[in-house]
Amino acid sequence: MIDITAKSTTLRKAIAQAILKVSSPETIAAVVNRTVPKGDVLEMAKTAGLFAAKRTSDMIPDCHPLPIEFTGISYEIGEMEITILAEIHTIYKTGVEVEAMHTASVVALTMYDMLKPIDKGISIEKISLVEKKGGKSDFKKDQEVSLKAAVIVCSDSISAGKNEDKAGKTIIEKLKGWKIDVPVYKVIPDEISIIRSTAQALVGEGIDLLIFTGGTGLSPRDVTPEALLPILERQIPGIEEAIRAYGQQRTPYAMLSRSVAGLIGNTLVLGLPGSTRGAAESMDAIFPAALHIFKVMEGFRH
């Protein structure tokens, strides 16, 4: 199965359809009038669909087991066909398209099995996805903006040439994956005055997204929050909470991080952990959703 551990939990929905075609109007009449010898076709098929929704991962090898929060099965009955609509909801890390199509398929197969004694010309057609919501597709519009980012590594040892930066480069790769230009990359020591002056200078240059990595821990030289908080014009606690909550699901040490988020003018400023893993997980926790800020901020220019 695909690794979904980095994905965020969101509300996911999918609607799928299957069309059952019959060879005689009498078959439809028997379904509607509940005179089929094997029983009530619509109710029996619906019950089978409810079981199918919850057992999809048992049948499709690459499907993840996930919590099914809602299953809705409805019918549109025509003269010679029945359209089956299966709607699935979950709050999870991956979508429910296959679950919806599996449900619609099993409903159709159950109908076929119950109707074949009275109609030998039945066929199942057009099993397809009708609609899906949730996940990355919901954030596409947020990425339709042209942004310039700066990544600043705060580290005494890296600025002195004693260690190699990995966290900053990881952040850059993730930004590029979201089509964000990164014209500025710097390494600076853990000094409040340098961190603060660097932030103010880059804001003055019109950088849209300013990300500092490092200095958010609790050692004596971890001073990035102390440098940034006094110059933030509007703090964004929700981003900070999201980073820590996401990290807490992966390691209890995340509660010790002092990540920072806020605005200076129209520039989004982030102070993220300096470990490669911490930086990567922080980016996964808030992007691309954080880009919505640039859609709603007053004064933003496309």
Image (cartoon, rainbow, N blue to C red):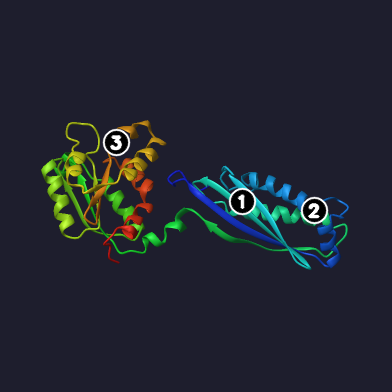
Three-letter residue code for mark 3: Ser
| Residue hosting label 1 | 99
Q: In the image, which is nearer the foreground, mark 1 or mark 2?
A: 2
Q: Earlier in the sequence, mark 3 or mark 2?
A: 2
Q: Would you say 220 lies left or right of 77 here? A: left
| Label 1 secondary element | helix
Graded by Cα atoms within 10 Å as few (under 14), some (14 to 19) or many (20 or more), the crowding at tag 2 reads many
Quadrant in the picture for the C terminus: bottom left
Graded by Cα atoms within 10 Å as few (under 14), some (14 to 19) or many (20 or more), the crowding at tag 1 reads many
Residue extending furthest toward the front: 298
**Rendered location of residue 56, percent (x, y):** 63, 47
**Rendered location of residue 154, percent (x, y):** 19, 43
| Residue hosting label 3 | 257
| Residue hosting label 2 | 41
Q: Earlier in the sequence, mark 1 or mark 3?
A: 1
Q: Would you say 227 lies left or right of 94 here? A: left
What residue is at 15 percent from the left and 52 percent from the top?
200
Q: In the image, which is nearer the foreground, mark 3 or mark 2?
A: 2
Q: Would you say 291 lies left or right of 137 here? A: left
Distance of label 1 from label 3 (alpha carbons): 38 Å
Distance of label 1 from label 2 (alpha carbons): 21 Å
Q: Is residue 131 above or below residue 193?
A: below
Q: Would you say 33 lies left or right of 297 here? A: right
Q: Earlier in the sequence, mark 1 or mark 2?
A: 2
Three-letter residue code for mark 2: Val
Q: Is 54 or 153 nearer to us in this picture?
A: 54
| Label 2 secondary element | helix
Determine which quarter of the picture holds residue 229: top left
